[in-house]
Image (cartoon, rainbow, N blue to C red):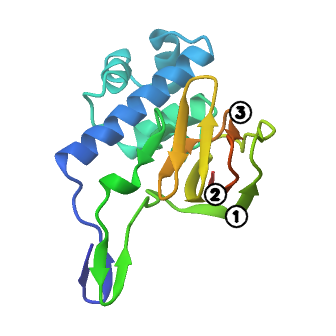
Amino acid sequence: MRSENGITVGMVPSPSEAAGVRGAIAANLRRARLGRGLSVRELAELTGVSKALISQVERGVANPTVEVLSRLAASLELTFGELTRIHLVGPEVIRRSESVPLAVGDTAIRTLFAAPDRRRFELAEGDIPAGTRSAKSSHGRGSVEHAYVVEGEVTVETEEWSVTLTSGDALRFASESDHVYTTGAAPCRVLTLISFSED
């Protein structure tokens, strides 16, 4: 970001960032269209957007206008944010041993995760006894959960994946599906931050 005459101006996204957004729109559009049982031709008829352009958007090779994206979103009963949001495909793990703290004066700071968009959130500290398997939980469409292990060891798992974390490890994952926390022979203290979509 930079400031011009007291106004904050966003920098032009890098080619990789732009490709990431195009890829997210492509996946979201295709998933929503197929979920509603629509062909490309049927979606074109609903929106007035050409079949060729819709096909290009779904392949991630087009740069559609805001107007086109808004029409596509509305026809699929999505918000603009839902159509353009980059979803987490799998869990992101940060191991304590793999990240280097930044020295700020006498303080060592490790940045774990940064939110890519505006979200409301809930921060909690959990003390999980040894040999405990939590109840299954999920937090709604578009939610993202962050976990940081303060002490001990815990395994976080869904139907698709399982990750074991130890002290100093961090994890970020899409929490709209059921997930559980399981401890072994020792208790665990974990901080969790759940961020919720504003849409």
| Real-space Cα separation, disc 1 to disc 3, in angstroms | 20 Å
In front of the other: 141 or 45:
141
Q: Are marks 3 and 2 in contact (CB under 8 Å)?
A: no
* Residue 170 can be seen, yes or no: yes
Task: Tell me which amino acid carries mark 2.
Answer: Thr
| Real-space Cα separation, disc 3 to disc 2, in angstroms | 15 Å
Examine the rendered structure and indicate whether residue 86 appears above or below residue 39.
Answer: below
Task: Tell me which amino acid carries mark 3.
Answer: Asp
Q: Say which quarter of the image contains residue 132.
A: top right
Q: Is residue 167 left or right of residue 178?
A: left
Answer few, some or many: residues within 10 Å of disc 3's Cα (few below 14, many 20 plus, some between 14 and 19).
some
Q: Is residue 86 left or right of residue 148?
A: left
Whole-percent x, y for residue 72 in the image: 50, 31
In front of the other: 68 or 188:
188
Specify the label residue 19 is tagged with: none
Answer few, some or many: residues within 10 Å of disc 1's Cα (few below 14, many 20 plus, some between 14 and 19).
some
Q: Residue at x 63, y 41 (%)?
A: 175
Whole-percent x, y for residue 192 in the image: 63, 57
Return the disc, 1 or 2, that comes first in the chain's sequence.
Answer: 1
Identify residue for label 2: 192
Answer few, some or many: residues within 10 Å of disc 2's Cα (few below 14, many 20 plus, some between 14 and 19).
some
Identify residue for label 3: 178
Q: Is residue 55 left or right of residue 186?
A: left
